[in-house]
Image (cartoon, rainbow, N blue to C red):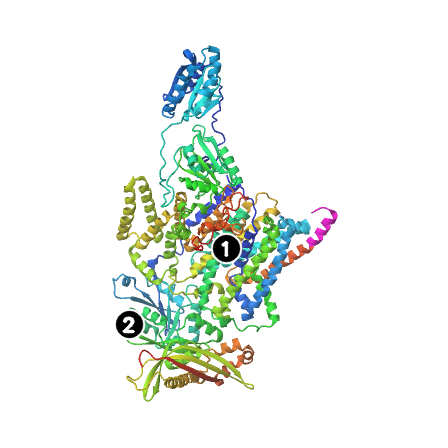
Amino acid sequence: MMYKNNDMISPGQFAHILILTVVGTGILTLPRELADGVGPDGIFVLLLSALFTLVAANIIGYIIKRFPGKGYFEILTICFTKPIAYIITLLFVVYALLINAFIIRVFGEVIKMFLLIKTPIELIIFSILIITAFLARGGIEPLGRMAELLFPMIVIPALLLFLLAAADVNLTNLLPVFQASPLEIIRAVPAGFLSFAGFEFVLIFGKYLNKPEKATKAMSIGIGVVSLIYLIIYIVTLGVFGRYQMNHLIWPTLTVFKVISFPGLFIDNIESLVMVIWIFIVFMSIAPMHLSKTILLGDLLKLRERDFLALPIVPILYLIALIPDSLAETYEYMGPFSNYAITFFSIVIPVIILILSVFRKNKGRESGSNA
Amino acid sequence: MSLWQDLFGREKSGEEVAAKETELSNNIDENLEMFKEVLVDCEDVVYREAFVGVKGAYKVAIVYVDGMANKDLLNKDVLSNLMINARLVDPDPDSIKAKIQELIFDQNLAVTEVREVETLEECVTNMLSGETILLLDDHEKGLIIGSRGFIMRGTSEPVTEAVIRGPRDGFVETARMNTALIRRRIRDPRLKVKVRQIGKRSKTDVAIMYIEDLVNRPALEQVEERLNTIDIDAIIDSGYIEQMIEDNWQTPFPQIQNTERPDSAASALYEGRVVIVVDNSPFVLMVPTTLNSLLQAAEDYYERWTIATAVRILRYIAVVISLLAPAMYVALTSYHPQMIPIDLAIFLGAKRAGVPFPAIVEALIMEVTIEILREAGVRLPGPIGATIGIVGGLVIGQAAVEAGIVAPLMVITVAITAISSFAIPNYNLAISFRLLRFGFIFIAGALGLYGIVLLMLFILVHLCGLKSFGIPYLSPFVNYIDNYTDLKDTFVLLPRTSMRRRNTIAFRKNVNRLKDHRPEKFNKEDNV
Amino acid sequence: MHRKKTYILFLMIFFSMFLMGCWDKIEIEDRAYAITIGVDLNQDEDNQLSITFAFPNPSAVLGESDEPVMKITGAGDSIYEVMRSIGTRSNRQIYLGHFRTVLIGEEVAKRPELFRGVLDALEKDPHVSRKVNIGIVEGTAKEVLDIKPSLGPDITQFIRQIFEHDKLINRAPLQTLNEIFEFMHRSEDGLITRIIPGATDVKVAGAAVFKDFEFLGYIGEEVNRGLMFLQDEADIGIFTVEHNDQKIPIEVTDTKTKYKLAQTDNDFKIIVEISMEGDIRQLYFDLKNDVLETGFLHELGSLLESRIKANVNHSLGVLQNEYGVDLVGFDEYIEKFHPKIWGEIKDEYDEIFPQMDVVIEVDAEIRRIGLSK
């Protein structure tokens, strides 16, 4: 007989989930997006995006503090009315489905290209989905533990590998700075901000935080760590390739590893090892999203036992992931969609919630009852 | 569905062995009749009737099992006292009866353990445990005399957990001796021992031991609750209990640790865990358990910390190797040769040119062979077993290479894997890894490196959801932000003086165990 | 019950995946590990490339055969096409995971569309490491691959090891794909090592000049040395100076090059400062001069300086006048350190470069003189 999961995660696990979700979504194309158009000034784009994200994340943290123990659906019901809450939650589920499918498709393509050339992509996608559903079925606790467990296992080897690549870094590739005008930099910030996407999902997990007052601290630390990681990746990739070459590479972060050659290291082509780390990263990005879909659907349908919902979502994801015919089409579909959707869900909705919560709280206090 | 129910389902109803409660009667002859009725055909039960008192007026009887009761004690301390010394009583028959009881009970029986019971069942159970029943005439209670004296093994070094440095006593099959071995190491009145009997027919003594102000309370409650739910015929070994109170019986990973060493049990108690001692089994159970504690060996703590740290790290590496080595071989040679240095790759290719099987079949053949060898080695007595293991391995491996069935690198891989699995201190865990290894080989054969990662993720997800009596199985790796002090005892072992705080699963109030820092050096020159 | 059922379902689905086919499994002995690829021009209009794959012979590793290298040639329009079509003629699959060197025949280099195609194929392939070496062969690649080097063991290793050698003494730019790509992406010009096939060995010396992906010609070893100095990539090298009719070889080490930009009215000039140390390798036996006398060393130093200055100037002249390509990296320098100026001149850089005013300053110090005087 199993001891029941008490469904609580610590702030540490919360921060870890946050870090891994965000890193997984943006990491592959990050350097190219930053350097696009502004070249080495991308560093400022990165810093500004990080600050911006910090603010947005803190808004979410604050919301969690304000409504401790309440799920996304509940918060929406309090701030808006029930029907609107239904619509927004449903939209969120659809949004999560699409982003999830997008990441999975890219993941499948990468794996197929680097590791298993002839294996049908359907199998690759399906297999990772099964394991994701398995994790989502366990609830939030195993997810928190996985995040805390895997974080050092991912980050430390990754940083070591980057250090090895640092031998090939040509620091002059980071110049010239201060070339782009402030206007150009600011215009590029939205693209940079998109690399931080993923943090809005933790709003759904705020309900399980066992110390909600630490939410803002956890968010800030999480975003800080992500920014640091991104900074290192950016500097190394730009240093190794130079801005002109980087524009031609689809996935600069992965291509960096093809340049590594450490004398005496017996493993020749290290990128297969990097693939292992990559699979972990993507898995830890997809799993929280899958879990949030399960939670939201369970809330919408007012179910008590919602763990089995993880499984039916799998075929839906699978089909959506296979819709685009090629990688280019995938990026084409996702481009404008993600711009609007991500901004909507990570900035617009939390801000509205915040404003409305202030009003409602006031109203609540006056009438002496809480919604 | 009915096949499913048969295999995995739960039984709706079983036979109920009714608990009868038969009172003893006043008349000793009736009592003896009851005894003989219940114990008909048990010809190792001895009935001894005697007449005590002046002129032998008072009838008493003792009943015991030959071979389990200590006859010396019965002769010297019970019978001789009753028959010889009780003659000093006043010859008046009425007062004899009244006094005799008092006399016998309070003054004459020079035995250390005496109790009174009222039902036949209790008498019988106790007698079958080795105690002696003393029946008195005109007395509706029976007296149970503690006289257990069956043969038991002297304490010896545990075979499965040998150490180079450390105590060499091991548990025996008697529960009471085992609790004594533990008590020697914890001379604290707060060490509690609670005994109960489990098993309808075996009525095995099961003792729960814990240190009151250190133990993890929820775990303790869970243990007691779960033990109460055991409804079984017989407990033959602690393994039975282990399987019945485990959190998750479907997983290959053991959630309860067992040991034959009293010092391991004692330190588990100090850590705030609960120890379960089962009669007739030299293996005691320790709960709650984490994966980390399964990879610790007793002597890590007795040697210096630098060595212990190195050995620990080595052990973790051995774990990884024993799980993944053959699978990596299959994955790399069949799917991703770019990871192998070019010269090795060419050489491998050359050597394998004549081998008829693909790498995965090779791996499976060799692994199965090694497993069979291992099992065979366990069954064979003493030196033959060890020799077969080594000789078998070498010779068969060499012969296989020459016959062209496997590649030499495969033999090396399999050998290293087998050796690494011996480095795992806990036998249960090593077995489960053996199973998992096969899983890895299969999936490596199907999907290469991706398959290995996939299965590893699967296992990790599974482990993350596993709890052992309330403690996450993978502590302290999964909650190190809050409990970072626990990390001092995982793959590194920091010096004793820096482990000042107690294990976090213990009761939270008692946090510090080392008061002061040890002074920097003992060697400092003191103003000579 | 729900929980257990879904759990079992998961397990079944998961484990059923193991039973599916293994699409990518190719046993290790079924692969041919191509180490060197030679790309040549084929006269056929349909299959314009003739590609040779050289891979080590496994039986040679076991000592059973004398042929260390096996080659297979195919014709097609691209590397990959040839790889697949060769499958009909070989019992092993060609595998590019380990390959190390590309040899491009001169004729192919002269056709930009083919050349660019080959480069792109190398960039796109996820299995090709960017530390691959590339060389333009003065002749055909096939010739080179047919050579049996007297220094053994086989030609593929031979070339690979030459490339990995540090001691090439600056006579050829040793580059990997990464550096070449960097150059090509930035300015569509580049320099690629030249390989000259001989009877029993190859010579790796000099380089091929590309402008706008067009093959313009070769630069020789000496010119290359000067170029190395300009590029701040010079390694140890021997220069011979003449002093009193005595030819003295001096080994130059620790070279550092710095650029500086000096602006005049509406023009600018670039100052290249080269500094180095020298090691005297050979004098006249039993010389009566006292070598430890600093004046003598300074004399030698200035002789060295003028020698190197002449060399570098010559190289620069070749680049500016004969080819008109900036292969030094001045454009990179200006872009990075003086971006404003770069903004002004970048569109006409091609015309500006040949006229650019470059001043070379050399500073050499002779520091060591060996064991004897």
**Residue type at numbered disc 2:** Pro
Q: Secondary structure at mark 1?
A: helix
Label annotation for residue A151: 1
- Given residues C73 and C173, the one toward you in this image is C173
**Alpha-carbon neighbours of circle 1 within 10 Å: few (<14), some, or many (≥20)?**
many
Q: Is A368 covered by the magenta stretch?
A: yes
- Letter of the chain that mark 2 sits on in the rendering: C
Q: Secondary structure at mark 2?
A: loop
Stretch of the chain drawn in magenta: A356-370
Label annotation for residue A192: none
Residue C318: x and y, percent?
42, 84
Q: Which residue is mark 2?
A: C149
Q: Is C100 covered by the magenta stretch?
A: no
Quadrant containing the C terminus of chain C is bottom left
For image coordinates 41% across by 11% down, the residue present is B55
For image coordinates 49% across by 85% down, the residue present is C355
The Cα–Cα distance between marks 1 and 2, rounded to whole angstroms, is 52 Å
- Letter of the chain that mark 1 sits on in the rendering: A
Residue B427: x and y, percent?
39, 43
For image coordinates 70% across by 54% down, the residue present is A358
